[in-house]
Amino acid sequence: MAESLEKLARTLGVSTELLEGLDAAMTERLGTRGILEKLLEKNEGAVAALLVSINSKGEDAHRVQSALRDMLFWQERELNKVLADEPGRDNFEKAASLAKKMARVGKGMFLKKDHIKAIFTARPPKNLLSYLKYKDVDDLLANQD
């Protein structure tokens, strides 16, 4: 377990002690042991699957980075093909139009307005404000749910 926590700590850029405290707190509150270890195993599985999907299993970091970049460019081209038929002046508006068509929003858990206000005040969503034609975050929150 200690080796797993050390690896996760390096990945996250935090101390092993912090993760040990987090693991102890989760065990105490949830009554389940090894949550962080399971998370690391799941992450390693996802990385392995990604490396297989880009045909880069066991290669050096430079080749993996190159393969990821190629995959990203391919996905962007595919997205642009889909967006080409959507209404809108630019790709942001086209993506928003597509998202509205695809979304099936029903009951669910959503952020409270004070939480989203804190997030949006710290990092205003300029494209969203422009797209919805609001001058600032306060204007957006006053008119949207």
Image (spheres, rainbow, N blue to C red):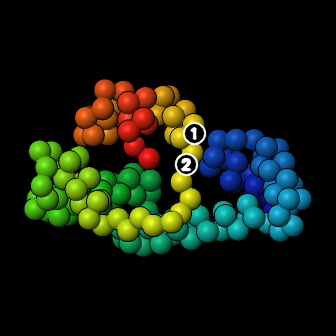
Residue at the image point whose x is 38% and y is 39% from the top: 143
Front residue of this view, candidates 139 and 58: 139
61 in relation to 33, above or below? above
Q: Is residue 15 left or right of residue 39?
A: right
The x and y percentages for residue 113 are 53, 41
Is there any visible trace of residue 60 in the rendered image?
yes
Q: Amino acid at mark 2?
A: Leu
Q: Is residue 129 left or right of residue 10?
A: left
Residue at the image point whose x is 24% and y is 60% from the top: 98
100 in relation to 114, above or below? below
Is there any visible trace of residue 57 in the rendered image?
no
Instruction: Characterize the local packing of mark 1: few (<14), some (14-19) or many (20 or more) Cα atoms within 10 angstroms.
Output: few
Q: Which mark is residue 111?
A: 2
Location of mark 1 (residue): 115
Front residue of this view, candidates 82 and 130: 130
Secondary structure type for disc 1: helix
